[in-house]
Image (cartoon, coloured by chain):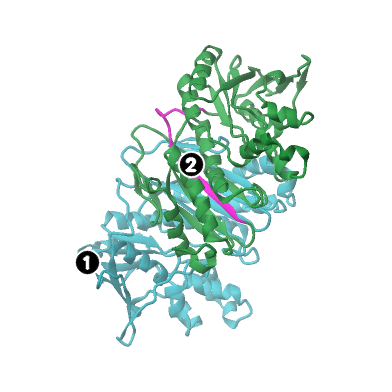
Chain colours: A green, B cyan
Amino acid sequence: MTGATQTVREIGEFGLISALADALPAGVTAGPGLELGIGDDCAVWRPAAGERIVVTTDSLVQGIHFRLDWTDWEQLGHKTLAVNLSDLASMGAVPRFAVVTLALRGDERVEDLRALYRGLGALAERTGTLVAGGDIVRSPEALAFHVTAVGETRGARVIPRSGARPGDVIGVSGTIGASAAGLALLLDPGSPAAGTATADLLREAHLRPEPRIALGGILLEQGASAGMDLSDGLFGDLPKILAASRVSARVDAARLPVAAAVRALFPDRWLGMATRGGEDYELLFTAPPDRWGAVSMAADKAGVPVTAIGEIVEARNGRPDLLMVREDGTEERVAAGAFDHFR
Amino acid sequence: MTGATQTVREIGEFGLISALADALPAGVTAGPGLELGIGDDCAVWRPAAGERIVVTTDSLVQGIHFRLDWTDWEQLGHKTLAVNLSDLASMGAVPRFAVVTLALRGDERVEDLRALYRGLGALAERTGTLVAGGDIVRSPEALAFHVTAVGETRGARVIPRSGARPGDVIGVSGTIGASAAGLALLLDPGSPAAGTATADLLREAHLRPEPRIALGGILLEQGASAGMDLSDGLFGDLPKILAASRVSARVDAARLPVAAAVRALFPDRWLGMATRGGEDYELLFTAPPDRWGAVSMAADKAGVPVTAIGEIVEARNGRPDLLMVREDGTEERVAAGAFDHFR
């Protein structure tokens, strides 16, 4: 056993590998399909006959994507895996396994990293994702966690970005803006809003997003035409669907599903939070109008309501445009643009 | 087009993605089996019927795994992919595609990163590896490159670590110690040895390792029982095969394939470089004695000679031991131990 204050440097790379494997639920390191997992050079997986494999990779870097004074280690482990599973979900794929790379300085407490793995392991167990190995490397400065998640299709089809057609309804799951509101509260802990009861929920939305895996399956099954997850905000991500599908969109500001708490705590900022905030990890999708009713009913039944926020229209002169209908009925052309970490 | 001095910050994340995709050979971003690649949330791959997929992930971090004053960007791109393909090769798998994560500060020159992608792309093209996407994240300090490579088996079987049996011959491909010698020369550029003609070859061995993909296929086909690639040095990696297979090994120091240049330039250090140096990315494997002749002939024919360096023996009291027979005929028990970045 490792003591509560032991560091990575003290137990070394190989001691850490077994301490972490040990922190995962038993069912998460081995399971059907996984022929080789933790402890060999590669993971070996037996794909289901006729299905495709779906692969995504996403990283959390200290100081860029998280701060240790904001998050606890279990939340961080959860989010590290969740942001990857969210990408699989957006395509309608079923998560199967993940490989995890930890970039560490060496002065981390082993117990904290075990808490990270407990958070990651709990989400893995709940979603049927096996942890099949990975890598531990030294980092001179910031911690970073890199996950590659592998899923399988349900029947050889996925929901791509490129399938939106004029007339399709644009839908979004859950509510948007809560993560940005939570981040604003974390950035300004002394504000009156930060002490309210709803502030906890908003911070939780930022620190512990829930990947919409079941909903992704429903969208695929019910005939969604295009989709992605909302990591860069509605006005950052919707233009990617529009560009890939060569269509335009009209979004109705009055129909955006923004939680009442976000509107109440941020009366001047809620619209920006909902449209440009990012990290909501809700699903953004399009569906033909004759499929909307079925999509919406199945989503309700699964406990993740979806809201129609607008429609896909023809691109004029072949140029994808995003138009927002304001609450007063006037229309504005939205400057597309995801949050860019480098600009 | 991007100017020669433009930085990542100037063209932004999305500008960089297209500048990099553009630096790859055309055949590397699309190909049979890859149904969705760069530009969507996930890569979608159609596995070959009956085969397994094989997944590995490996990272290079600035200041830990590379220094920009030692390597050029094309070499660095090559090595970033090569260390991953080497893991696939060690199992006898065929590389299919890779996803690449770049962790960047933002002040990098776009042209340097395009050179990185040219080096990575050239190796990808030559080995039939598609580049299927990835992620670009900001890093507060050091650059880091993370690759996950996905391969397929040849006929549902792989060469695991766990298959070595008493009596098996222990083989290694190429020569060992050259990478450690090259690193020593890079660390001490003012030494007389560093100016010699062979020094270039040794530095090249460190900076531009060649993954033994064809040899991996030969080993699988000819019945190798266990294998891995030499990233942590013979005395770091062989114990992993011994532990996984629950056997011991006797290695003959006189038979280690150490290049004459390494012995000549480092008369006092060559043995340590060959056994504990790491990063040779040669294949270490075991084969039943009646398969050795066929393995060795097929390897010669493929232009990558293999050398028998010892044999697998029963573990006494169930404890895997690594014994080295010195050149004078005496035997010593080797303290197993890979290089540990944290200790």
Q: Is residue B326 magenta?
A: no
- Badge 1 amino acid: Pro
Q: Can residue B85 be seen in this view?
A: no
Q: Which residue lies furthest to the bottom in this view?
A: B328
Residue B136 versus residue B163 in the image, above or below: above
Q: Nearer the viewer, residue B79 or B162?
A: B162
For label 1, count other residues whose C-alpha is less than 10 Å away and answer few (under 14), some (14-19) or many (20+): some
Give left or right: position of A234 versus A161: right
Provide the residue span drawn in magenta. A143-159
Residue B88 versus residue B263 in the image, above or below: above
- Badge 2 amino acid: Leu
- Quadrant where the N terminus of chain A sits is bottom left
Look at 60% across and 20% down and name the residue there.
A307
Q: Position of residue B194 (x, y in %)?
A: 58, 77
| Labelled disc at residue B289 | 1
Look at 53% across and 22% down and name the residue there.
A225
Q: Nearer the viewer, residue B294 or A194?
A: A194
Q: Which residue lies furthest to the left in this view?
A: B290
Q: Where is residue A130 in the image (x, y as percent from the top left)?
A: 41, 44
- What residue is shown with label 2? A123
Q: Does the magenta stretch include residue A158?
A: yes
Give left or right: position of A4 versus B105: left
Circle 1 or circle 2, nearest the eye: 2
Separation of disc 1 and disc 2 at Cα? 47 Å
Marks 1 and 2 belong to one chain: no
Residue A204 versus residue B229 in the image, above or below: above
